[in-house]
Amino acid sequence: MTSTLIAVLAAYLMGSLSSAIIACRLMGFGDPRTQGSGNPGATNVLRLFGKKAAIITLAGDLLKGLIPLLVGRWLGLPIETLAMMGVAAFLGHLFPVFFGFRGGKGVATFIGVLYGLAWPTGVIFMLVWSLMAWLFRYSSLSALIATASAPLVMFMFIPSQNVIGATVLMASLLFWRHRSNIRNLLTGKEDKIGEKDDEPVSSESDGA
């Protein structure tokens, strides 16, 4: 029991390392939460500071969901513990203890967790996201559709009640974090991929 708590806490602390904030500060851009949409995620960083900063942010957010689970697998932890660690890392990204509990929306970290639990699920998520992005040009809509499919896809590879429950919980939180994007999509106000207006981006208008 103690080892499980330590593993879950370690995963949460790693998830609390905000890739966007750390990368942008090191690159001299400041805190992305004070600019653009205010979301410390790859989409907002891309709009504000360009591809290099966005790629670093995306990679960092994905890895902090993946690395704890890889370490857990190396230690021989059961899949139920890995699922708990994945949720903890995801919650760390959403509510980072190191940054005032003001985190991102969790898409990249969710992908990292999916890879850590069953790597084909992560691959399928990215394929669905890419197809939806190509068809509709909305990052948030692509993420939401891919997220909605994740529990079913996970069930195909790991039909474990605990793992599916963890996946559903993360997917539900991801939808909740995207509630403003959903409103914007319904009212036609959501920015498309590649759009960069001269005016500041509306609050939480990105999907990463």
Image: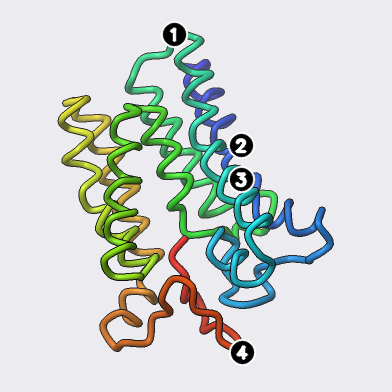
Report the amino acid beneath label 2: Met
**Residue to which mark 1 is pinned:** 76
In the rendered view, does 153 fall on the left or right side of 16?
Answer: left
Helix or strand or loop: what does disc 1 sit on? loop
Per the rendering, the mark at residue 16 is: 3
Report the amino acid beneath label 4: Asp
Q: Where is residue 207 in the image (x, y as percent from the top left)?
A: 43, 65
- What residue sits 61% from the left and 37% below the top? 14
**For the residues marked 2 and 4, what is the alpha-carbon distance in whole angstroms?**
35 Å
Q: Where is residue 4 in the image (x, y as percent from the top left)?
A: 47, 20
**Residue to which mark 2 is pinned:** 14
Marks 1 and 4 close (CB-CB < 8 Å): no
Helix or strand or loop: what does disc 2 sit on? helix
Density class for disc 4 (Cα within 10 Å; few <14, some 14-19, many ≥20) is few
Foreground of the two, 194 or 96: 194
**Residue to which mark 4 is pinned:** 198
Foreground of the two, 51 or 65: 51
Q: Where is residue 199 in the image (x, y as percent from the top left)?
A: 60, 91
Residue 3 vertical position relative to residue 114 in the rendered view, above or below? above
Per the rendering, the mark at residue 123 is: none
Residue 46 vertical position relative to residue 156 in the rendered view, above or below? below
Marks 2 and 4 close (CB-CB < 8 Å): no
Helix or strand or loop: what does disc 4 sit on? loop
**For the residues marked 1 and 4, what is the alpha-carbon distance in whole angstroms?**
51 Å
Which comes before the other along the chain, label 1 or label 4? 1
**For the residues marked 4 and 3, what is the alpha-carbon distance in whole angstroms?**
32 Å
**For the residues marked 1 and 3, what is the alpha-carbon distance in whole angstroms?**
24 Å
Which comes before the other along the chain, label 2 or label 4? 2
In the rendered view, does 104 fall on the left or right side of 178?
Answer: right
